[in-house]
Amino acid sequence: MTDALKRLSDEGVAIWLDDLSRQRITSGNLAELIDQQHVVGVTTNPSIFQKAISEGHGYDQQLGDLAAREVTVEEAIRMITTADVRDAADILRPVFDATGGQDGRVSIEVDPRLAHNTRATTAEARQLAWLVDRPNTLIKIPATRAGIPAITETIGLGISVNVTLIFSLERYREVMDAYLAGLEKAKAAGLDLSKIHSVASFFVSRVDSEIDKRLDGIGTDEAKALKGKAALANARLAYQAYEEVFSSDRWAALDKANANKQRPLWASTGVKDPAYKDTLYVEDLVAPGTVNTMPEATLEATGDHGRISGNTIAGTYEQARAELDAVEKLGISYDDVVQLLEDEGVDKFEASWNDLLKSTEAELKRLAPSEG
């Protein structure tokens, strides 16, 4: 192992693990990653839980108890996932305390089927925060049109939020605006702003996957030269937007009230194209005040052969804008791409949730007590 993960951390990038399972908790693996690999947070999503519950027998005891009580499948899922998040939050609590609440956090997502319902999303966020009952939890809310006002309402209640599925620069600005509006509501309600935290999960690799596919369809040398550039350009311009918003007069007023900045979080940082270096979306998105949540394979690759050479976002904005403009000039609509990715993202999480319902139902039936 190199000391690349330490260097990344020293550059101001918080390293979070994009995975969680009962086995990872009970085996001591999560504690080991915190102790040895500079991991200071965990993110989850419906796909991660679906995989965890459907593999192995780590959940048999709890599933058996739930089956004996004849709970609904949805209640079983909530009991299982919140138990994992609670236990992971306890393991990360020393990090939370040492960083003043900045890190040491575990994210859990609202039911993705509620992604287009503001009121239901807000209600579910409040319920999840109550169920997990740990100060170092982040409730994940998708950055859909209905999700934006839900972010404001949830932050206004004093609940910390991880905004997920952000693909477009315009939507990201709406997310930051929603966060500031939520802080203003919380301040008006007399809440302690220093206790409210948020990250904005800006998705990276999926942008390249979709745009590269369209560039391949064009097939010219000019198009091929732009492959693998759009996702980094998009993320770097997001960081520029972050710098602008969190140096504004509006932010200054909240800063005086001890509010915390909403950090950009680079999500979907495992490369999808094997032609690209497996540490691409780590090495080229280094900047202070950011989070990079990595699948374990990307974490291991960075630790093994990552090359961290200081801030790789500063000074890139002009080039990033030129690269996105060049893609647009070839007839690839940025707005069309990011809307498609948002829609697909919600659909994928909803499909994973439905798979989770099916596999959990099957496990409950398998472990149900026999008659008599």
Image: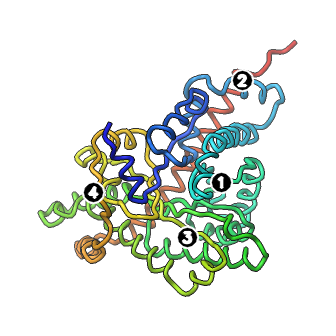
Q: Quadrant of the C terminus?
A: top right
Residue 326 % position (x, y): 23, 73
In the image, residue 112 above or below residue 65: below
- The Cα atoms of the two marked residues, 3 and 4, are separated by 25 Å
Of badges 1 and 3, nearer the viewer stands 3
Residue 126 screen position, x and y as percent = 75, 58
Instruction: Residue 213 in the image: state x and y as whole percent.
Output: 28, 56
Neighbours of disc 3 within 10 Å: few (<14), some (14-19), many (20+): many
Mark 1 falls on what kind of element? loop
Report which quarter residue 69 is drawn in: top right
Does dot 2 land on a helix, a strand or a loop? Answer: helix
Secondary structure at badge 3 equals loop
Reading the chain from its start, which is encountered first: label 1 or label 4?
1
Counting residues from the start of the chain, the first of labels 2 and 3 encountered is 2
Per the image, the residue denoted by label 3 is: 261
Q: Which mark is residue 309?
A: 4
269 shown above or below 167: above
Q: CA distance from mark 1 to mark 4?
A: 37 Å
State the separation of the CA atoms marked 2 and 3. 41 Å
In the rendered image, which residue does mark 2 sit on? Answer: 61
Which quadrant of the view contains residue 334?
Answer: bottom left
Task: Tell me the CA gap for discs 1 and 3.
Answer: 23 Å
- Report crowding for label 1: few under 14, some 14 to 19, many 20 or more residues within 10 A (C-alpha): many
Q: What residue is drawn where x is 27% and y is 77%? A: 318
Residue linked to disc 1: 110
For the point 72% across and 66% down, which residue is it? 158
The scheme the figure's colours follow is rainbow
